[in-house]
Amino acid sequence: MHAFLGFGRLQIAANIAALQHRAAASLGIANGPDLRLSWRIREHVDEPLDLKAFFLLNNDNDPLFGAEMPPRFKLALRPEQRRSLQSMILRERNGTTFKEREIVEGLLPELGWRAEGKAERDRCVRGGIVADQVGYGKTPISLGLITSTLDDPLPPPEDLDGRIHIKATLVVVPAHLMGQWPDEVKKFTGSNLTMIQIKSLSDLNTYSVKDIMKADIVVCSILLFRDGS
């Protein structure tokens, strides 16, 4: 019986490219000039979650006066409404850039290691949520945003795939609020905006493509998207 004393070699392979591609697929893209891929191998331990306190951004500290009245308006907005409108216009035109990131892990728990493939890109998001109190006047403020940006150039069409590029703002509302938006449009802007109301599929069939292309606002019931009725 012979004994062998020496050193052995253990090779462990990690498919880093596969991890990176899976992370990129989670972002919904395979490649692109703004896609950044990276990887690392680190110790695999159960790390406690470090949840920091969240807080909601708002415009309470913005100047109350100075925001201009929206164009095509017949009635004046209150100063605090104009403050909210100014904040909405800035977010709509400038947007907010943040890093979108996905990480895919390959675990080797027996060795206490893990490989991570990371994909990230910068995303610019426009718009936001109007969460003022009930009765504050969110509908006229939203109308002010529509009229203030109505003459802004449309973004260049990307892959339309047979679809038509229009300027209209689509407003989707519950069925019981179908009458509120038309009333508010007429109250604050008179006849300065062209509006189309679509309560059902039969209403939609009464309009031509040219009618919708001429519209400034299309008010649509959410039921049209739920069941197609």
Image (tube, helix red, strand yellow):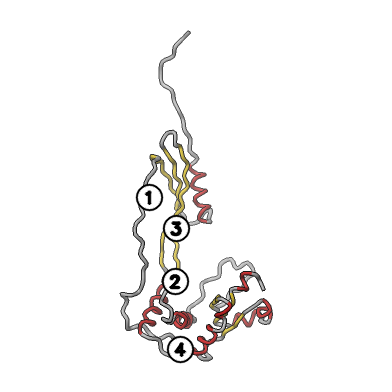
- Give the spatial CA distance, label 2 vs label 3: 20 Å
Circle 3 residue: 100
Q: CA distance from mark 1 to mark 2?
A: 28 Å
Q: Is residue 186 left or right of residue 201?
A: left
Q: Residues within 10 Å of mark 1 (few under 14, many from 20)?
A: few
Crowd around label 3: few <14 · some 14–19 · many ≥20 (10 Å): few
Residue 96 located left or right of residue 193: left
Identified at 58% across, 66% down, the residue is: 159
Whichever of labels 2 and 4 marks the residue nearer the N terminus, that label is 4
Instruction: Give the quadrant of the C terminus.
Output: bottom right
Cα separation, mark 1 vs mark 4, equals 50 Å
Q: Position of residue 5 (x, y in %)?
A: 41, 15
Q: Residue 188's x, y, as percent?
A: 47, 88
Q: Quadrant of residue 113?
A: top left
Of marks 3 and 1, the one in the foreground: 1
> Disc 1 residue type?
Leu
Q: Position of residue 131 (x, y in %)?
A: 42, 73
User: Do callouts 4 and 3 mark residues in contact (Cβ within 8 Å)?
Assistant: no
Q: Are marks 1 and 4 in contact (CB under 8 Å)?
A: no
Amino acid type shown at disc 2? Ile
The residue tagged 2 is 129
Badge 4: how crowded within 10 Å, few (<14), some, or many (20+)?
Answer: many
Q: Which numbered dot is residue 49?
A: 1
Measured in 3D between alpha carbons, the distance from the residue under mark 4 to the one under mark 3, in whole angstroms, is 38 Å
- Label 3 amino acid? Glu
Residue tagged 4? 73
The answer to which of marks 2 and 3 sits earlier in the sequence is: 3
Q: Nearer the viewer, mark 2 or mark 4?
A: 2
